[in-house]
Image: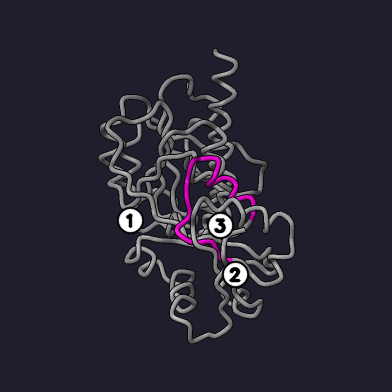
Amino acid sequence: MPPIKHITSRDNPFFKELLRLSESSRQRRKAGQTLLEGVHLLESLHAAGGVPDRLVVSESGLQLNEVARLADQNRGAPVIALSDRLFQEISQLETPVGILAVIPLPRRPRPPRPADFIVLLEEIQDPGNLGSILRSAAAAGAGQVYLSTDCADAWSPKTLRAGMGAHFALTIVEDADLAREAEVFPGKVVAAAGRAERTLYDANLGGRVAFIIGNEGSGISPTLLKAADEIVAIPMARGTESLNAAAAAAVCFFERVRQKAHPR
């Protein structure tokens, strides 16, 4: 295992920087870094060829075989050990595993051309919902996900945790002009809305598809609805009004998967 620096004081500058990265999207963008916590996410980063800037472990975490293994396979990144008390302050988990990484935010330009399957997300506010949508998008084979300016931070620790590694399988474009992306997309743009004359299952999703998923409360804005080629609703039992945004997105994405597997 590489040499490990131990930190036990809250006054340590690096610990203060970790706190700022865990709490502030502005600080994450300023530093060009974010925090990735947990064994699974670090393994996903490694599988995608990513290298952390620094690896942070807790004193008790070092006693766990899986944490020690990742610390030993840190690909040259410095390893810092925090006291359990300090690590708990940084962690987003009720029961911390004892390992996290400081990773660089990806600097990806706008893709030169859209994939066959993309997702346009408008004002998704909850990091857990956003991460779950990204996870479903990756599992369903989406290539790119575009986020409006008012979406939650795609690279916050909470969103990363909910995404469960999906971030490393997608091209994620933040602060996107969704109406423009819909306009230039060379396929069918489908908006999932609570009320529509056609259902999701009436739509032909076998070709190139862009799905629009809107805000948890207010749905899709009128401007973006006008940019859609087709507006569809998910059929639900009488007396129910709507699905959680992440659940609705998953239903839409995997209906496309089903149709691709069983063409009409």
Amino acid carrying label 1: it is Thr
Give above or below for 105 relative to 6.
above
What is the C-alpha distance between the residues marked 1 and 3?
Answer: 17 Å
Query: Disc 3 designates what residue?
Result: 128
**Displayed quadrant of residue 254:** top right
Amino acid carrying label 2: it is Ser
Amino acid carrying label 3: it is Gly
What is the C-alpha distance between the residues marked 3 and 2?
Answer: 16 Å
Q: Identify the residue shown where x is 32% and y is 44%.
A: 108
**Displayed quadrant of residue 260:** top right
Choose between 78 and 192: the one closer to the eye: 78
Callout 2 secondary element: loop
Q: Tell me which label, 1 or 3, sits earlier in the chain.
A: 3
**Displayed quadrant of residue 82:** bottom right
Q: Residues within 10 Å of mark 1 (few under 14, many from 20)?
A: some
The magenta stretch is 39-56
Query: Disc 2 designates what residue?
Result: 91
Q: Tell me which label, 3 or 2, sits earlier in the chain.
A: 2
Residue 261 in the figure: left or right of residue 32: right
Q: Position of residue 196 (x, y in %)?
A: 47, 37
Choose between 256 and 194: the one closer to the eye: 256
Give above or below for 258 relative to 223.
above
What is the C-alpha distance between the residues marked 1 and 2?
Answer: 27 Å
Q: Position of residue 72 (x, y in %)?
A: 62, 54
Residue 214 included in the magenta stretch of the image: no
Image quarter where the C terminus lies is top right
- Per the rendering, the mark at residue 149 is 1
Choose between 239 and 249: the one closer to the eye: 249
